[in-house]
Amino acid sequence: MTDEPIHIIGGGLAGSEAAWQAAEAGARVVLHEMRPLRPTDAHQTDRLAELVCSNSFRADDWEANAVGLLHAEMRALGSLILRCADAHQTPAGGALAVDRDGFAEAVTRAVSAHPRIRVERGEVAGAPPADWTSVIVATGPLTSPALAAALGALTGEAELSFFDAIAPIVHAESIDMNVAWRQSRYDKAGPGGDAAAYINCPMDKAQYDAFVDALLAGPKSEFKDWEHVPYFDGCLPIEVMAERGRETLRHGPMKPVGLTNPHRPDVKAHAVVQLRQDNTLGTLWNMVGFQTKLKHGAQTEIFRTIPGLEKAVFARLGGLHRNTFLNSPRLLDAQLRLRADPRLRFAGQITGVEGYVESAAIGLVAGRLAAAERLGEPLAAPPSTTAMGALVGHITGGHLAAGAGSFQPMNINYGLLPPMDEAPRGEDGRRLGKRDRVRAKKRAIAERAMADLTAWAKARALA
Ligand SMILES: Cc1cc2nc3c(=O)[nH]c(=O)nc-3n(C[C@H](O)[C@H](O)[C@H](O)COP(=O)(O)OP(=O)(O)OC[C@H]3O[C@@H](n4cnc5c(N)ncnc54)[C@H](O)[C@@H]3O)c2cc1C
């Protein structure tokens, strides 16, 4: 056991959660965040845990959705990120969405006020100094080039960078509500009871076809040296989706199902553009699934052809960004440590998980593992039957390597969790129909996860 601090590099979703968990466990922490002294291409503030694009932490149903299960596990382990998200929720149907400013401010305040955490502003612009005996690197998809180069030299693996795109945000008052309407798909109420959490803009077939043509023809940003690098499938730019087929958008973010236009209830829309509330005031709405690499002028022109958005004023247009992540299955051990230099742990998106929640979850685990090691009470990662353990397992070995570049960023999903030994049955012991069986299976996986997580946390507390 030593009283030397754990140095955490990067005060984003993962680094903030890791710092909190390590400090709560009793370790001292120095959190190094380079903003505002050195900006990134996407962050706009000096706050910790800034959300750079969507304000959604996705579905919040722990029994029916894998990311909802991750929320529940994190809440059970005292996650700072989930606590602040819950305190700054905005309406979003069945999803957990937050007021981004209130959320990040709350995280910043809590971390800065913790007696065992010191926040130091400044870039770590090379390999972490040799006298930092425990380090968590949580510098995210936009890891500064100097540190990325040092990590590349250390790991012997070339860093991987590729394009990803952010969606535009529209001022609510500029949306024509005589054309658009508020409704959640299938009127599904969210945690706050709101069944009208989205603004919907309808398109008929001619409008949709013209829109797809415009996307295909619109000028795109240059690829430069990132050409030929793949996208995550979950964050494809709309014009790339349009390139995959005329109907792709209508079956993706623009699907018209579960919605009825109150202005024209007898006419079924051919496609629907949805916007989700982005701040507590309800003044800003982001275009769901509309991440794009179209040039800014083209975005304004093309998105104003969407019915209801003819006079849209954009608070932010879509854009491109870099993504940096390690080939973790080869580089990291089960403790999230670099095999080549075990004083370095990794957390967040740089480990090859994808998304705010997943990044924070890996931060939570890394913070606890580092603190346990520092305090002389080594701890195993959560079991693979939990969503958190499944994510750790995937990035530290669960992925089946199939050649160079086969390891790609991954959201949490049920496929990462081991299946149940027995198929769930009805109360009377009879086989369930397909829909009920799927629902019961998810519930059983969730119940197993929560029970195993509780046992893991308890064993630690008793040790
Ligand atoms: C433009 C963009 C849009 C995205 N959109 C979404 C989305 O809509 N939904 C979603 O779930 N996920 C999205 N992602 C992924 C998202 O970044 C991650 O899910 C999440 O923010 C990653 O958390 P993190 O803590 O790993 O990294 P971050 O939250 O990015 O935090 C890393 C921190 O490290 C700091 N840093 C970097 N280098 C150094 C250094 N050398 N020294 C000191 N500090 C450093 C940065 O300033 C930053 O604060 C997006 C990513 C980008 C880049």
Image (cartoon, grey):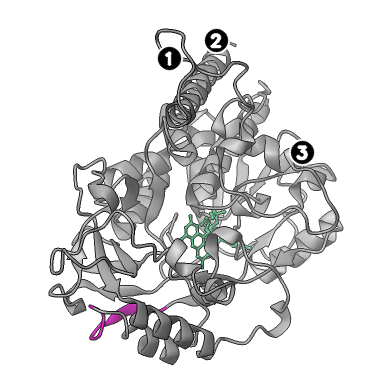
Residue 114: image location, x then y, percent = 41, 40
| Amino acid on which the number 2 mark rests in the picture | Leu
| Amino acid on which the number 3 mark rests in the picture | Gly
Task: Please tell me whether residue 347 is drawn above or below residue 44 in the rendered image.
Answer: above
| Amino acid on which the number 1 mark rests in the picture | Gly
Give the mark nearer the N terminus: 3 vs 1: 3
Q: Image quarter for residue 337?
A: top right
| Mark 2 element type | helix
Task: Please tell me whether residue 256 is drawn above or below residue 347 in the rendered image.
Answer: below
Residue occupying image coordinates x 63% and y 31%: 369
Was residue 311 drawn as part of the magenta stretch in this picture?
A: yes
| Magenta residue span | 308-317
Residue 388: image location, x then y, percent = 57, 34
Q: Which residue is mark 2?
A: 462
Circle 3 Cα neighbour tier, 10 Å, few/some/many (<14 / 14–19 / ≥20): some
Q: Residue 397 — which label?
A: 3
Is residue 299 something one can see in this rendering?
yes
Q: Is residue 53 left or right of residue 138?
A: left
Q: Is residue 240 left or right of residue 309?
A: right
Q: Which residue is mark 1?
A: 426
Image depth: mark 1 or mark 2 in front: 1
- Ligand 1 is within 8 Å of the C-beta of the residue at disc 1: no
Quadrant including the N terminus: top right
- Measured in 3D between alpha carbons, the distance from the residue under mark 2 to the one under mark 3, in whole angstroms, is 29 Å
Residue closest to the eye, 185 or 389: 185
Residue closest to the eye, 91 or 75: 91
Residue 130: image location, x then y, percent = 78, 50
Image depth: mark 2 or mark 3 in front: 3
Residue occupying image coordinates x 32% and y 68%: 272
Circle 2 Cα neighbour tier, 10 Å, few/some/many (<14 / 14–19 / ≥20): few
Give the mark nearer the N terminus: 2 vs 3: 3
Was residue 53 drawn as part of the magenta stretch in this picture?
A: no
